[in-house]
Each structure stands twice: as C-alpha cells, then as structure tokens.
Image (spheres, coloured by chain):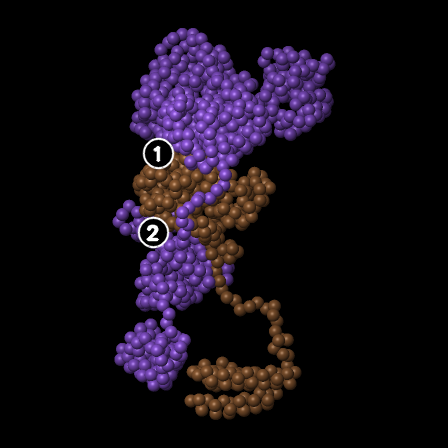
C-alpha cells in the first residue's frame, strides 16, 4: 500500500505540474486546479483514505507543492492574486441562530443572581388548589382577588394560580427549614388583554426562612438583586402595605433604572420604580406549613417581571411578548 | 379617596410642608397618588384680586337683553361697573368679585374690556369659575353680608390642596378624613381633634320602627327621624368641600350623608319617611323575584343572598350599596329617616359584584367598617341636618346584636427588633401605639375599635410600630451557616434544551396556556373567550399560529420553539403539568427532524425513531411530522426524555485506533426504510459498526422500477485494535448478508 502510494505520488506530481504549467488561460488554470486539487481529485481522495502518519505527511507536502505551483502560474499569467481579489467586507457565511425570549433572558438572570446568593430555584405548579393559592396564605374569604371575575377557576376548589406565592406553601411543606428559594413562572388573572395588561404574566417569588431573617435582610437582599439586574448602584426603599401572608408587609421600590433616580416619565418623576410586595412571612402561614413561628421566621417577596422588561426595553405593548413576531424576538 | 387639606386641618394640626407630609404618609400609611392644587392660584398677589362685593345697583344692560349692568362696591369708595350674565341676584346682594388682572382657576386672566359697549371692570363669579362646585347657573350670593372689600379668601375656600390617597384592603379607617387625620397626627407629631359632632336637643321621642331580621348581614342599625326639614342646596362651604373631595353636591340632606361618610368613614342613607310603607324599616335578605329601581335609574333583580333595607312591603335600598328611587329624598321631602348602620363586608362585596355596582358606600363596607362608628356618624349627621335643613330631630333607635369587643393583645417588646432588624425601645413602641388610639396597660394592649379586624396578634403590633420607621431600616444580608444552591437536574437540562434550539436557529416563543375547548383538555369554569377556554395538552396550536403570523408578515426564515408546561388530566384534583418542548420550522419534516436529532444527540439519547405513515415518526417521548403549509414540527415530553439522559457519559476510545470508512449502496424495494436497514446492519455487525449514515437515495433506470438505491457512509472501528481490511470485509459481508436476507437488498458495485 505504502509502495503504491509512493509510486502514484511521483507520477501524480509530474502530471500535475505539467498540467499547471501548460495552462494558458484562467479557465484552463482553474480546470487544472479542479483536476489535481479539487474535491474529487485523486490526491484529495487519497488524503481522505490515509491511515498512517508517514503517508499523510508526504501527501500533504505534495498538496502544498501543487498549490504553490498553481499560485506561481497564476502570477505568470498576470492574474490577480487571491488576496488582492478578496473583498473582506463581504458578509461571512451565515450561521442561523435564534434568540431566547426576552422574558427567559430576564428570568435566567434573576435565577442566577439568587443561585449566587444561595437560593434554590423551585418549580411551582400553575394549576393550584384554592387552599394553596388563598387559604394557606391567610387570604381572607372576603378578599376581592378570590372573585371569579378576577380569577380563573376550573371548579370550586381548583384554579390557575393568581400569584407565585403558593410555591412558598408547597416548598415549605416539602422541606424542613431553613429554606431559601425563588420560584418563577406564569400566573393568571382575568384581566383585559390590552397594551398594558395580559391575562397570563410572569412573577418571581422569593422566600427566605431561617432563625433570624429580618426586614433589614429583605431590604439588603432586594438591593443586591436590583444592583445585579439593573447595574450601577440601586437603592431600595420600603413602604408600608398589606398582604394577608406577610406581617409586617411592605411594597418595595428601586431607584429608577432608566433615569438613575433623577426623575423621568417612566418613574413619574419620583426617581423610584415600584417593584413588588414583600414582608415578613405571617406566623399563620408558618403554622399552616408546620413551622414554629417562635423558632423560624423570614421574608417573602413577589414581583412581576413582564413590566420590568417592558419598561427597560421601551416596549410599547405587552402583547408583543405573546405575538412571537421574529422581527421582535430577534432584537434581544 | 380625595382629602382636601383644609378639611383635614380641621381634625389635626400639623406643621409640615404638604409634600413632606405626603412623603411620610407614603412610607407609613397609604399611597398618595398625587397632590392636587385646586382653585385660585395663590401667587403674585393673585388672591388679593378676589374680593367681596356688594351690588349697589343692578339693571338691564342697554345693548344686551341677557346681560345685567351692575355697580358693585368692592370697598374702594367708588363702585365698579361690572357686566354680568346671571340674574339670580339683585341690588344689595353680596357677591364674589374678581378684579382685572386676576387669574381664574382655569387659567383665564381677566382684563378690563367693554362688553356690548359697556366697560366691565371685573367679574362676578359663579361656583364653577372658582372650582367650588359644578353649578354655574347663577353667581354665588354670599350669606351674612360680609363687608365689601373683604378678601374673598376669608369667606370662601378659594385655594385648596387635595391629597389623592389610595387605601389598602385592611384599613377601612383610612377611607375617612378623620382616619387620615389620625395618621397625620402620628407621622407629623400633630394634635388630633376629638371626633366632631354633638347631638342637638331632641324635639320629640317618637318610636322609630326598625326591625333587623339578619344581624349577620347588619350587626347594627341606628335609625333617626326628623320632621320639618327644608330641602335646599347646601351652603357654599359644604358644597366646596364635597366638590374638592370629588363628590357632586345634591341637596342639603343628601350632602350631609355624603359629608359624614367622607368625614368619618361610615356611610349613611336618608329616606323620605312618608314614602316608607308603615314608616317601617326591615333589614332582611331579598325575597325571590324582588326588584328595585336604584338611584342610578336602573331596575335591578335581587337575589336571596342580597341584603336589603325594606319597608313593610318592598325593598327600599340595596343594603350598603345604593338606595332606591321609591324612597328617595326629594325637593318636597320634609320627613326624614336617617340610616346609620353597619353592614357585613362579605354580604356587601358579593351583592356589589353580582349587581356590578360599586359605590363610595360599598367600597367602604367591603373593607369592614367599625360598627362603633355608626353612632358617631348618626350624631354628626343629626347635628348637620338640624343646622342645615332646619329640621327637628324627633326619634332615635339603635338596634344591634352584641357588638364585637376589641381584642386585647400582648405587647412583646422584643418582637419588633426581632422581625425588623433594628432596635425599638419599648417607650417608643408604647408612645406610637397610644398615638394611634391603642390603650396600653403594661403588656396588655387594647386595640381601638377601628382597627379590630386588622390587629389581633402581637405581630400585628409590630407593624404599627415599624411602619413609621421603614426609611431607617438598614440593608443587611441573611447570615447563614451554609450557602449552596444549584439548579435541579431538570432545570439544568431544560436550559440545555433551550440552548440547543437557539443555537440551531430557533427563536423562543411564548404562547398562551389557554386554548379552545377540545378533547382531553381541562375547561375553565368560565372561559375567557372562545380562543382561551381550556388548558392546553400540547404546544402545537400556539406555535402553528405564531409561525403562520410570521410567514404572513413576510419574515424570511421562520423557526420557533417553546419550552413550557402542558396540563394533562390524571383523574385527581390537579392535573399533571409535564414540561414539553415543541418546535416548528420551515423545511418540512426533515427540517424539524434535523433539529430534533441535534437535541437527542446533545442529551446523549438514542432517539429510537419509529416510522409513522408518511412524513411522520415517533420516539419514546414525542413525535416529529410535517404539518399543512410545509411546516416541520416536533414536540417532546421532556420529563420522559430526561429519564433517559445519562448522568455521566463515559469515554469511548475512538482516537487510538482509526476508523475504516467506506461507502455502501444497496438497492431495495421502494417500501424499505433506511432506518430499518441501519438497525438490521447494526444487529448483524455488532459494535464494530461504529457509524452508518444514509447520505443519498437514488431512483432511476440503473436500479429499475419501484426500486431505490440508498447509499450509506459506513465506518468500522474498534476501541481495541486497528481493524484490518480483512476485518472490514468480514463485517461488510455480514451486513450484506443480513440486508439481503431480510430486505432482499442488493449491494451495488
């Protein structure tokens, strides 16, 4: 085999060099190139079949000699050199690539920030029991959000979750404290479908239960989160609020991520953007899941992410998230 | 609710700029959406251009039938000539005058100019021009004849600042100006005045026939009767306050009920007593088929869950929501029955929802109004009805069940610091609680009646203390013994699936979880629309619609995927929610299959395709097929796929000993599938057949009719030694033989 290749190589080289030298026009030269160096030329076929190193090196050296001869002849024929003829401003070979949905991008960043702070990512459920969604969260029976005008029910006891908070209940019932988690996903409210509201949207839930978790820890954690997501230095402020499942309850605002706090149209010249609700987990909730509120305490927070991306990227209409227009998706 | 600051200031004295007050309230008490400035601007001496005037002469304008020409004394010695379009006054009337140069609330600047030939050196003003009311049918005629030239601002509330406040579900006390005043006293260290209202002398002691049949729906009903009322417009001060608070003034008695509701937070209603059958009030649930035409003119069918105020025969009001036309206070009314009651929040909420009727009253009741307030509301309203309508108070009754006692809660001084993370001295806690009306006796705290729904436990007291210092809370991070977290296996693999598809050119789509009704889909109790009526069991519909939309929009390369949950019934209350991935692309069946193969390869899972009919194949966890419109589509159940993903791929040596590569082509019948040939070849040749990929299918004369030739790129390799040509020949022979026996395949030379 080796012997045959050697003989073939010598004959081949002679024949090829002759062929190249006798080419008189660019077309003839190109024909010679195809014949001796093209994809189906004996040399290229032989190169593909090589199984030992020595033959490979010899055939590759031959290929280089033939290529050099080809270039030389090109010069003799006063054809433009390859390098001169090349337009480096032409676009490269297209490699198609898609994009992550804008909300997936934000969702992953949030998950990663919290993983970095030692929080698990908990996959909640979307179809929930009324008990997990409302009762266990201390929601009074008279609370307006329970109304079928606001909530999608499947039957009297089953609904599409109206917030990510039932994930808190599930997680705490599944595991012993301490618990540090975030849970992200779709939530459902019977809202109009218009530029500023959609009946399906996305929330992030956070929960930290340990021996001494305080509102101060909530403020620090939110500041860390906001700085990581929005960059720069972000302040967080807390205002009093009411949620059945936290006590005390707060709403938290973040330094406006568009104007940096100077005041702009988006933050209504307040310098702050409302992010979501939070508070210390209500002792009733802890008791419901079997945690002793004298031993364990912590914070929970929840916020919608659709609006954040909407404001940051200057979207005109929330429905863009659901239209899946590639002209939209490909921008992010 | 809208809180006029002048009104607020009647209940609390504070010494803070209004912006700072609003800022503090935002942290401690309630949202302040806006600070609204109403009325005459108080700058550049503008207010000084508004004066009390006395009309010394009034007569027909010589050149205009509809105008009056007046001489008005504004304390300058000489009267001013003013042209006026209103006729509800004459000589001697005291009026509100704006001088030339004055800027009106709507921004108009007055100048001195002739009107139909007569110079008007000012303007006589109506309520609407001063934003004191909505009435502009006539000008304001001032009572008590103040001295001409008196600054108008001394007589009328010309400038007003209004706080636009949003209150939470848990704070019915903040739906009252007095309740806001209580918060202001706490945040601004102000002085809170006692709740206003004093019972006037009662002119008679006639019985008031009130029967409460449903104490659950109506724990308390204070009924008071009045005689000899004169229904007329309220005085300007009240009209101005109601207008500033966003309410339309109607007539003195009705205005009093609204005024007291705004002031104290307990809604009231006034009936014309002569229109009540037997003069009686019965509080009960509606009877089947009962109807009422409410004050908004709408005929409403009642339901036995609705609580109504009835007379001896029929409903006269939907309790806590709206009165009925049949018992309305009218201009000729003189006999009044005033209702100051308390209604169950849930009852009001349900009826209000069912009737789709939300009112200022119902939004208060549904938060749970303090039942003790009914009495205060009755007292203040009584005082005002007697004062403003010249009525005599003739009867009183207070029907109630046992009213709830405010809870006594243990003060745990360590708790605020434990939960908030900063020190709260016990003296501070006590002082804050007392300021809010809590009675503190050692560690026993009696909750005020207006907070008894909301504050029942030690932890609730923490909020009452902490909410005034939220700005000072430090920012710390939890101190933890161990910090470690990572994505779960499923989360990690889901991310990987997304990465593969994005890398393969697919754009990620989000489509609705709700789809039209269909077999196997769990329906919503009440659909959102025909398109959004049930839970999806697969991702196909949304992706097809999205892909079509893109194609119709002229997008050049359409390829979309979605990774999301679907919802499959499993015979329990909650469905299973498996994660699926679906993808749609141009390039038909093979386009989708290529992407699917890449996905499987990434996960190190053999797809095990099984041919379906035509352009379709299944794998253990999903299928790929061609859809109408030339779309290639696949969908997989990821939970099942992930079960087959090896945790740890082990190294296979494919480097030390080279592979022997050759092309083999077989002629077979049309019906034979390449996949079956490969499977049979693998079975025949064993692991040394490392790879066998179909790369060309040829049909034509050389192979004959109803036949095809499939060419395979084949690689033989062993991890243990270099395979010789003889080895390769042997393997090839086994393959040829197997394919020949099973499929009648013939190796092409």
Q: Which residue is mark 1?
A: A141
Q: Is residue B233 above or below residue A59?
A: above
Which residue shows up at 39% across the image and 80% down it?
B660
Colour in which chain A is shown?
Answer: brown
How would you rate the neighbour count of disc 1 (Cα within 10 Å): few for under 14, some for 14-19, many for 20 or more?
Answer: few
Quadrant location of the C terminus of chain B in the rendered image: bottom left
Q: Nearer the viewer, residue A308 or B440?
A: B440
Q: Point out which mark residue B232 bears.
A: none
Whole-percent x and y of residue B181? Answer: 50, 24
- Chain under callout 1: A
Which residue shows up at 37% across the image and 27% down it?
B410
Whole-percent x and y of residue B114? Answer: 72, 23
- Report the residue that reaches farthest toward the front: B481
- Chain under callout 2: B
Labels 1 and 2 touching (C-beta < 8 A): no
How would you rate the neighbour count of disc 2 (Cα within 10 Å): few for under 14, some for 14-19, many for 20 or more?
Answer: some
Secondary structure of the residue carrying numbered label 2 = loop
> Could you give the CA–CA distance between mark 1 and mark 2, rounded to whole angstroms?
28 Å
Classify residue B329 as left or right of residue A232.
left
Classify residue B33 as left or right of residue B61.
left
Q: Nearer the viewer, residue A182 or B678?
A: A182
Where residue B139 sits, quadrant-wise, is top right
Where residue B220 sits, quadrant-wise, is top left
Q: Is residue A182 above or below residue B413?
A: below
Residue B153 in view of the camera: yes
Which residue shows up at 51% across the image and 24% down it?
B185
Whole-percent x and y of residue A3? Answer: 45, 91
Q: Is residue A109 above or below residue B657?
A: above
Which residue shows up at 45% across the image and 81% down it?
A48
Colour in which chain B is shown?
Answer: purple
Whole-percent x and y of residue B529? Answer: 39, 45
Q: Which residue is mark 2?
A: B577
């Amino acid at each position: 085999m080796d012997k045959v290749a050697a003989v073939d190589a010598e004959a081949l080289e002679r024949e090829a060099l002759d062929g190249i030298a006798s080419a008189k026009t660019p077309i003839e030269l190109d024909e010679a190139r195809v014949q001796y160096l093209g994809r189906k030329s004996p040399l290229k076929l032989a190169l593909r079949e090589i199984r030992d190193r020595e033959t490979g090196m010899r055939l590759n050296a031959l290929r280089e000699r033939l290529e050099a001869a080809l270039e030389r002849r090109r010069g003799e024929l006063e054809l433009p050199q390859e390098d001169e003829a090349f337009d480096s401003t032409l676009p490269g070979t297209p490699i198609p690539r898609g994009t992550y949905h804008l909300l997936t991008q934000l969702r992953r960043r949030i998950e990663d920030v919290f993983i970095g702070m030692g929080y698990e990512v908990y996959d909640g459920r979307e179809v929930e029991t009324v008990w997990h969604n409302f009762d266990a969260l201390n929601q009074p029976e008279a609370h307006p959000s329970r109304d079928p005008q606001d909530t999608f029910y499947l039957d009297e006891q089953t609904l599409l979750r109206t917030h990510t908070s039932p994930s808190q209940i599930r997680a705490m019932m599944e595991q012993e404290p301490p618990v540090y988690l975030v849970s992200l996903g779709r939530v459902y409210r019977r809202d109009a479908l218009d530029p500023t509201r959609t009946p399906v949207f996305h929330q992030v839930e956070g929960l930290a239960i340990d021996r001494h978790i305080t509102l101060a820890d909530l403020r620090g954690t939110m500041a860390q989160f906001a700085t990581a997501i929005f960059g720069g230095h972000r302040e967080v402020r807390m205002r009093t609020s009411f949620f059945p499942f936290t006590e005390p309850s707060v709403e938290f605002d973040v330094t406006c991520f568009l104007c940096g706090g100077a005041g702009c149209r988006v933050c209504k010249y307040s310098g702050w953007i409302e992010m979501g609700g939070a508070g210390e987990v209500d002792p009733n909730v802890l008791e419901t899941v079997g945690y002793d509120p004298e031993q364990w305490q912590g914070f929970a927070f929840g916020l919608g992410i659709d609006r954040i991306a909407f404001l940051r990227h200057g979207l005109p209409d929330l429905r863009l998230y659901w239209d899946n227009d590639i002209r939209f998706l490909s921008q992010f | 609710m809208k809180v006029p600051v002048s009104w607020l200031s009647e209940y609390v004295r504070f010494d803070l700029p209004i912006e700072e007050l609003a800022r503090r309230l935002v942290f401690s008490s309630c949202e302040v959406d806006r600070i609204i400035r109403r009325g005459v601007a108080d700058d550049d001496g503008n207010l000084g251009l508004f004066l009390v005037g006395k009309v010394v002469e009034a007569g027909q304008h010589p050149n205009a039938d509809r105008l009056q020409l007046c001489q008005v004394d504004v304390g300058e010695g000489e009267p001013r000539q003013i042209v006026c379009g209103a006729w509800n006054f004459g000589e001697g009337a005291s009026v509100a005058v704006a001088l030339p140069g004055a800027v009106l609330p709507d921004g108009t600047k007055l100048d001195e100019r002739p009107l139909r030939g007569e110079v008007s050196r000012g303007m006589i003003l109506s309520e609407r021009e001063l934003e004191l009311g909505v009435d502009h049918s006539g000008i304001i005629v001032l009572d008590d004849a103040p001295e001409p030239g008196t600054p108008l601002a001394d007589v009328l509330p010309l400038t007003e600042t209004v706080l636009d406040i949003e209150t939470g579900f848990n704070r019915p006390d903040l739906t009252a100006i007095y309740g806001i005043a209580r918060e202001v006293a706490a945040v601004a260290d102000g002085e809170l005045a006692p709740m206003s209202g004093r019972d006037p002398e009662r002119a008679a002691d006639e019985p008031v026939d009130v029967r409460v049949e449903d104490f659950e729906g109506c724990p308390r009903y204070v009924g008071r009767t009045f005689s000899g009322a004169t229904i007329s417009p309220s005085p300007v001060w009240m009209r101005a306050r109601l207008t500033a608070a966003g309410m339309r003034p109607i007539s003195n008695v009705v205005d009093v009920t609204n005024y007291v509701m705004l002031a104290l937070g307990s809604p009231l209603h006034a009936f014309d007593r002569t229109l009540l059958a037997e003069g009686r009030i019965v509080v009960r649930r509606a009877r089947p088929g009962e109807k009422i035409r409410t004050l908004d003119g709408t005929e409403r069918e009642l339901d036995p869950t609705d609580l109504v105020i009835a007379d001896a025969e029929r409903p006269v009001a939907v309790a806590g929501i709206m009165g009925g036309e049949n018992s309305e206070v009218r201009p000729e009314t003189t006999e009044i029955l005033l209702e100051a009651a308390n209604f169950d929040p849930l009852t009001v909420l349900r009826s209000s929802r069912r009737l789709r009727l939300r009112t200022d009253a119902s939004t208060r009741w549904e938060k749970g109004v303090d039942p003790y307030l009914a009495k205060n509301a009755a007292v203040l309203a009584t005082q005002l009805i007697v004062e403003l309508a010249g009525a005599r108070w003739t009867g009183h009754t207070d029907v109630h069940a046992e009213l709830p006692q405010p809870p006594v809660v243990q003060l745990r001084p360590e708790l605020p610091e434990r939960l908030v993370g900063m020190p709260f001295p016990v003296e501070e806690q006590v002082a804050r609680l007392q300021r809010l009306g809590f009675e503190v006796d050692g560690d026993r705290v009696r909750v005020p009646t207006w907070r008894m729904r909301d504050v029942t436990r030690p932890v609730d007291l923490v909020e009452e203390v902490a909410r005034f210092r939220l700005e000072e809370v430090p920012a710390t991070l939890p101190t933890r013994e161990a910090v470690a977290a990572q994505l779960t296996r499923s989360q990690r693999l889901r991310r990987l699936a997304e990465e593969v598809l994005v890398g393969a050119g697919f754009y990620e789509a989000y489509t609705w979880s709700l789809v039209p009704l269909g077999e196997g889909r769990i329906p919503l109790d009440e659909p959102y629309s025909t398109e959004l009526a049930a839970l999806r069991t697969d991702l196909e519909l949304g992706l097809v619609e999205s892909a079509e939309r893109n194609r119709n929009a002229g997008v050049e390369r359409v390829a979309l995927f979605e990774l999301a949950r679907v919802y499959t019934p499993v015979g329990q209350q909650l469905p299973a929610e498996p994660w699926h991935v679906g993808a749609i692309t141009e390039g038909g069946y093979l386009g989708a299959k290529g992407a699917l193969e890449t996905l499987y390869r990434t996960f190190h899972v053999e797809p095990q395709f099984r041919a379906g009919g035509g352009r379709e194949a299944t794998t253990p966890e999903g299928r790929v097929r061609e859809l109408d419109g030339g779309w290639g589509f696949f969908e997989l159940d990821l939970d099942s796929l992930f079960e087959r993903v090896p945790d740890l791929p082990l190294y296979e040596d494919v480097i030390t000993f080279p592979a022997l590569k050759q092309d083999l082509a077989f002629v077979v019948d049309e019906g034979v599938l390449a996949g079956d040939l490969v499977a049979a070849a693998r079975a025949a040749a064993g692991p040394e057949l490392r790879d066998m990929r179909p790369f060309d299918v040829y049909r034509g004369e050389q192979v004959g009719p109803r036949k095809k030739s499939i060419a395979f790129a084949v690689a033989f390799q062993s991890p243990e030694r270099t395979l010789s040509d003889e080895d390769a020949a042997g393997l090839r022979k086994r393959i040829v033989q197997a394919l020949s026996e099973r499929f009648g395949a013939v190796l092409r030379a």
